[in-house]
């Protein structure tokens, strides 16, 4: 079940990243995808991945605020 969550989270993150140029709502969705991927990293015990994705979510949210 955790693997399925990870696949969905990372797929969502990648799709929203690809669609960011279509509007700032996709930037916010990408932020949420990064948070979901970060949670997957921590739940699966791969904390470096969780930390990096958490940092990406902060950067994406800042980009959303300034767009």
Image (cartoon, rainbow, N blue to C red):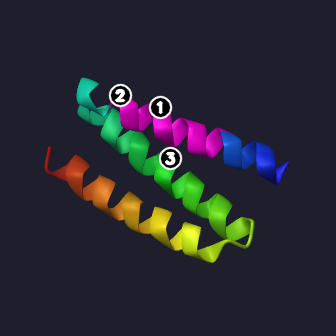
Which of the 4 image quarters holds residue 49?
A: bottom right
Main secondary structure of the magenta stretch: helix
Q: Residue at x 72, y 67 (%)?
A: 43
Q: Residues within 10 Å of mark 2 (few under 14, many from 20)?
A: some
Q: Is residue 45 left or right of residue 52?
A: right
Residue lying furthest left: 66
Query: Is label 3 in contact with label 1 (beta carbons under 8 Å)?
Result: yes
The residue beneath circle 2 is 19
Q: Mark number for residue 15?
A: 1
Q: Residues within 10 Å of mark 1 (few under 14, many from 20)?
A: some
Q: What span is colored magenta in the figure?
A: 8-19
Q: How many marks?
A: 3
Does 2 lie within the magenta span? no
SS class, disc 2: loop
Q: Is residue 21 left or right of residue 44?
A: left
Q: Residue at x 73, y 46 (%)?
A: 5
The residue beneath circle 3 is 33
């Amino acid at each position: 079940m955790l693997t399925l969550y990870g696949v969905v989270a990372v797929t969502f993150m990648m799709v929203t990243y690809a669609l960011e140029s279509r509007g700032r709502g996709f930037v916010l969705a990408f932020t949420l995808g990064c948070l979901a991927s970060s949670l997957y990293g921590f739940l699966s015990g791969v904390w470096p991945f969780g930390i990096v994705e958490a940092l990406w979510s902060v950067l994406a949210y800042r980009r959303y605020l300034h767009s």
